[in-house]
Image (cartoon, helix red, strand yellow):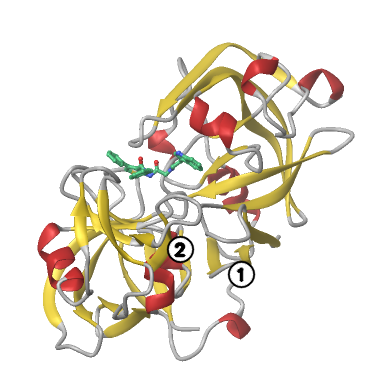
């Protein structure tokens, strides 16, 4: 089996996150979910939520699905690094993405979501595509959509072709040669943290020299920006007129009309360049002439994250073989 579905930016001006239409249950209920390689819970806004926590999201109503079954006495609770959180109970139901169906997929129904999720009216939930070891369901942890679908797939892979301010695709079970140029460079994945953790071979700022240095980080479709060690950030923003690290805004900001260099990172011998337009991320507040950078420091996170700002500069193959690997190509 294979599947292919759109990755749609939730906001027309800034790529805060991308959502993908999915069908759940019988008759099918269509929700738009954030496919997230940085976590492993599939959770949705549901009919169990208080109305005060719903602001325009589409909810999943298990009672309206003839194939929904409550997973008795199972609960879940997740907190992300940005402090956002959700928790609830668990059903199993049919789950379809771009023509690829998994029966008895664990669908975690939210009974409570934090304000940052309530505020995101275009995100109806998340589909975790990290390793199932990170799943938070107790007493028995559940498998991700990818782990459930893998045995039925033509190839045990999914690919991310995210785009800057436009619609991209997630493909499941096949690699679409038309979506990239040149060759795909595969590097090993360390699955023990539970994320798609790999080592980049170094970086360059603009047209400057490439600095060969190992950067251990995760490929994370669920995080908007790129978070890297402070030394790399200093090297980058030193080249940006008026850039400062702002306590007020919690990161590097600069005048929106400043000229930004591109940022290149290494995957083995290969090089992926993030255009400067991706790094001038967004005004700090609507209409401000101060912009927030798409590259930020990972010093307070304890982990380097290659989020959407980096992923949309490449065609990325998440290969779930034994052992898993991750492939990067230009496009
Ligand atoms: O959780 C994810 C991906 N799902 C995000 C879902 C989501 C959370 N609010 C959302 C809001 C809208 C849509 C999706 C989400 N990735 C990972 S792996 C390790 C960390 C981490 C661990 C410790 C400390 C920091 C990060 C994170 C993390 O917290 N990223 C978000 C972030 C990272 C940095 C700054 C802000 C946010």
Q: Is mark 2 within 8 Å of ligand 1?
A: no
Residue 301, x across and y down, in percent:
22, 43
Please tell me whether mark 2 sits on a helix, a strand or a loop. Answer: strand
Foreground residue among 14 and 316: 14
Residue 331, x across and y down, in percent:
50, 83
Left or right: 111, with 191 as reference point? right
Q: Is residue 49 above or below residue 215?
A: above
Q: Which residue position is annotated with label 1?
A: 174
Q: Residue at x 35, y 48 (%)?
A: 195
Tag 2 and tag 1, C-beta contact below 8 Å: no
Say whether disc 2 or disc 1 marks the residue closer to the N-terminus. Answer: 1
Q: Residue at x 23, y 90 (%)?
A: 207
Q: Is residue 48 above or below residue 172?
A: above
Q: Residue at x 50, y 89 (%)?
A: 181
Residue 250, x across and y down, in percent:
26, 45
The quarter of the image that holds ligand 1 is top left
Residue at the extreme top of the image, as rendered: 73
Q: Which mark, residue 18?
A: none
- Is any part of residue 49 visible from this angle? no
For the residue carrying disc 1, how many other residues have a C-alpha within 10 Å: few (<14), some (14-19), or many (20+)?
A: some
Left or right: 257, with 119 as reference point? left
For the residue carrying disc 2, how many other residues have a C-alpha within 10 Å: few (<14), some (14-19), or many (20+)?
A: many
Q: Which residue position is annotated with label 2?
A: 319
Left or right: 96, with 234 as reference point? right
- Quadrant of residue 279 within the rendered picture: bottom left
Q: Is residue 247 above or below residue 199?
A: above
Please tell me whether mark 1 sits on a helix, a strand or a loop. Answer: loop
- Quadrant of residue 209 within the rendered picture: bottom left
Residue at the extreme right of the image, as rendered: 27
- Quadrant of residue 211 within the rendered picture: bottom left
Residue 174, x across and y down, in percent:
61, 69
Q: Is residue 247 above or below residue 70?
A: below
């Amino acid at each position: 089996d294979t599947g292919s579905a759109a990755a749609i930016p939730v906001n027309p001006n800034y790529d805060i996150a991308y959502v993908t239409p999915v069908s759940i249950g019988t008759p099918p209920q269509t929700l738009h979910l954030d496919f997230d390689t940085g976590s492993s819970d599939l959770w949705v806004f549901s009919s169990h939520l208080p109305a005060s926590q719903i602001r325009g999201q589409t909810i999943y109503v298990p009672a309206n699905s003839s194939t929904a079954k409550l997973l008795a006495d199972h609960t879940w609770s997740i907190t992300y690094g940005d402090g956002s959180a959700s928790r609830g109970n668990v059903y199993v139901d049919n789950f379809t993405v771009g023509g690829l169906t998994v029966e008895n997929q664990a669908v975690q129904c939210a009974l409570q979501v934090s304000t940052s999720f309530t505020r995101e009216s275009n995100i109806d939930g998340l589909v975790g595509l990290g390793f199932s070891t990170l799943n938070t369901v107790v007493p028995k942890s559940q498998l991700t959509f990818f782990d459930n679908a893998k045995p039925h797939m033509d190839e045990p892979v999914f690919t991310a072709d995210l785009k800057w301010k436009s619609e991209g695709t997630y493909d499941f079970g096949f690699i679409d040669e038309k979506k990239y140029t040149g060759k795909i460079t595969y590097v090993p994945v360390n699955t023990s943290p539970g994320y798609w953790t790999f080592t980049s071979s170094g970086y360059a700022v603009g047209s400057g020299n490439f600095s060969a240095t190992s950067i251990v980080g995760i490929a994370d479709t669920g995080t908007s920006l790129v978070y890297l060690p402070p030394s790399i950030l200093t090297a980058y923003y030193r080249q940006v007129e008026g850039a400062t690290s702002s306590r007020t805004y919690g990161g590097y900001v600069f005048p929106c009309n400043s000229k930004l260099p591109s940022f290149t990172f290494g995957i083995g011998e290969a090089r992926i360049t993030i255009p400067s337009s991706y790094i001038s991320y967004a005004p700090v507040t609507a209409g401000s002439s101060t912009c927030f950078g798409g590259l930020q420091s990972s010093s307070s996170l304890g982990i380097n994250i290659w989020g959407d700002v980096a992923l949309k500069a490449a065609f990325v193959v998440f290969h779930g073989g034994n052992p898993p690997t991750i492939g990067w190509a230009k496009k």
